[in-house]
Amino acid sequence: MSQGKTIVVTGASDGIGAAAARRLHQDGHRVVIVGRSPRKTAAVAAEIGTDHYLADFTRLDDVRELAAALDAAYPHIDVLANNAGGVFGDRSKTVDGFERTFQINHLAPFLLTQLLMDTLVASRAAVIQTSTLNGGLVRELDLDDLDHEHDYGAIRAYNAAKLENVLFAKELDRRYHGQGISAAAFHPGNVATNFGSQSTSRLMKFLATNRVARSVLLTTPEKGADTLTWLAMGRPGVDWESGGFYEKRRPGKRLNPLALDKDLARRLWDRSEELLA
């Protein structure tokens, strides 16, 4: 196991991001945490004694400022863990004009990775995406309606974004593995966090707020972060294969067939660049 990596973790003010940051720091790595909440992010950073940055992924200007700050402060980044995400309620747009679930879960981390690409390539970095079971339970991904203007549902939009995370990891591997980048996506399990508290889904709100259900049906943030920390600390090509999807430190066996569609991955990448342009 390599020690002393520089690891950037987004969504690290709570949940599995915070748990991963603690574990990675304990194991001797230089962890840089990114969060939206000033209070929570500063508290986690103070607890483990590490650097932190604030960024609200509903604002792409925040992502651009974050990338510039990281580039200036860290000429070498070994791991970028794109862990920030969320499932929400009624459909709403960000200040940038995109549907909130799509922007926070896919477009913002896509932009952050793009802006850091020179540093990531020079560092031969690993880029890790936090996804879901099966990589998103959807049957179709409409690249002309990634904002879900015609078929919005909170869970539908979230599942589509999690599929996009896997497609992004696979296409990142295809485009940049030859330049030294490794990429993977993983499913953390059903974790007891505040993740679904803003959702209008009855199931998500129930799991986010009912203590008995959380204790029986959900795993802890520490267990949910295990595969993330394993990927971050591991050696691509030795401990895990670039372009893969992982669950409990093993290749996921129930991956959504759409996640294996190479043409869809390519077109999603191109469409994401068009939207950001």
Image: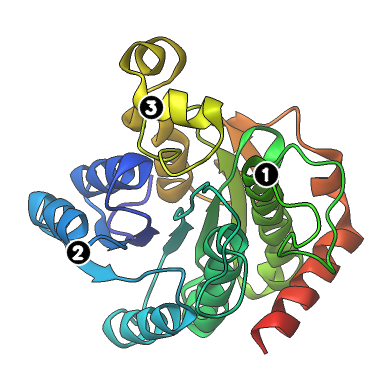
- How far is mark 1 from mark 2, CA to CA? 28 Å
Where is mark 2, residue-wise? 38
Q: Where's the N terminus, which quadrant?
A: top left
For the point 60% across and 69% down, the residue is 107
Residue 134 location (% of width, % of height): 71, 34
For the point 79% across and 77% down, the residue is 270
For the point 64% across and 55% down, the residue is 165
> Of helix, strand and loop, which one carries label 1?
helix
Q: Where's the C terminus, which quadrant?
A: bottom right
Where is mark 1, residue-wise? 159
The residue type indicated by label 1 comes to Asn
Which image quadrant is residue 14 in? top left
Vertical relation: 190 (above or below) 33: above
Which image quadrant is residue 205 in? top left
Residue 244 location (% of width, % of height): 68, 45
Please state which of the two labelled residues, at mark 2 or mark 3, is closer to the viewer: 2
Left or right position of 70 against 250: left
Q: Check whether the beta carbons of the residues at disc 2 and disc 3 lie within 8 A of each other.
A: no
Where is mark 3, residue-wise? 223
Asked if one can make out residue 189 in the rendered structure from this viewpoint, the answer is no
The residue type indicated by label 3 comes to Lys
Vertical relation: 74 (above or below) 68: above
Residue 193 location (% of width, % of height): 36, 34
> Of helix, strand and loop, which one carries label 3?
helix
The tag earlier along the polypeptide, 2 or 3, is 2
- How far is mark 1 from mark 3, CA to CA? 22 Å
Q: Check whether the beta carbons of the residues at disc 1 and disc 2 lie within 8 A of each other.
A: no
For the point 87% across and 58% down, the residue is 262
